[in-house]
Amino acid sequence: MTKKTLGAASVPLSKVVIANGFVFISGTVPRTPEGTIPEGIDAQTRLVMDQIKAQVEEAGSSMDKIVKTTVFLTDKTNFAGMNAAYGSYFPSEPPARSTLVCDLVIDILVEIEAVAVL
């Protein structure tokens, strides 16, 4: 197996792992480089998706090569807002997706992880 990691994290994980033709993106949270978290599900989802886009591109892939995502929501009433923002990043042939409602480690509305092919 060939493995390459990109990005540093403040916890014991790799933000991006490239292995055997796949790009695995860890759960991405809506935090700006300055450490702020925008308000609202639309803004948080768009920030997360923009970060995922940058990560897959840095790894040598693209949004249309994402094959699977997992979305974690803290409140099911945010599903429609997340879905609308998320869907704008996949105008055709969206990836397989699971969506869960759960408690998250920090006070955010959404976290998303993704798997892409190179």
Image (cartoon, rainbow, N blue to C red):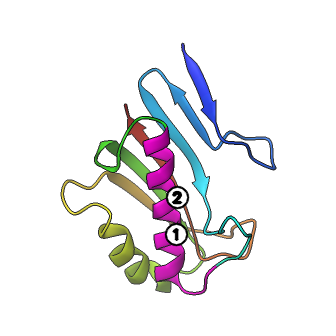
Tell me where residue 57 sits by quadrant.
Answer: top left
Overall secondary structure of the magenta section: helix
Q: Is residue 93 magenta?
A: no
Q: Helix, strand or loop at disc 1?
A: helix
Amino acid at dot 1: Leu
In the rendered image, which quarter contains the C terminus? top left
How many numbered badges does the structure rendering display?
2
Per the image, the residue denoted by label 1 is: 47
At horizontal 42% and vertical 35% (from top left) the residue drawn is 60
At horizontal 66% and vertical 75% (from top left) the residue drawn is 108
From the top left corner, tell me how far across and down residue 1 is, in percent: 54, 13
Per the image, the residue denoted by label 2 is: 51
The reply, left or right, for residue 28 in relation to residue 78 is right
Task: Using a 10 Å C-alpha cutoff, classify the residue at mark 2 as few (fewer than 14 neighbours), some (14 to 19) or many (20 or more).
Answer: some
Q: Which residues are magenta?
A: 38-58
Between residue 43 and residue 100, name the one nearer to us.
Answer: 43
**What mark, if any, has residue 110 been given in the picture?**
none
Q: Is residue 76 above or below residue 70?
A: below
Task: Using a 10 Å C-alpha cutoff, classify the residue at mark 1 as few (fewer than 14 neighbours), some (14 to 19) or many (20 or more).
Answer: many
Contact (Cβ within 8 Å) of mark 1 with mark 2: yes
Between residue 93 and residue 96, name the one nearer to us.
Answer: 93
The reply, left or right, for residue 83 in relation to residue 55 is left
At horizontal 64% and vertical 44% (from top left) the residue drawn is 15
Distance from Cα at disc 1 to Cα at disc 2: 6 Å
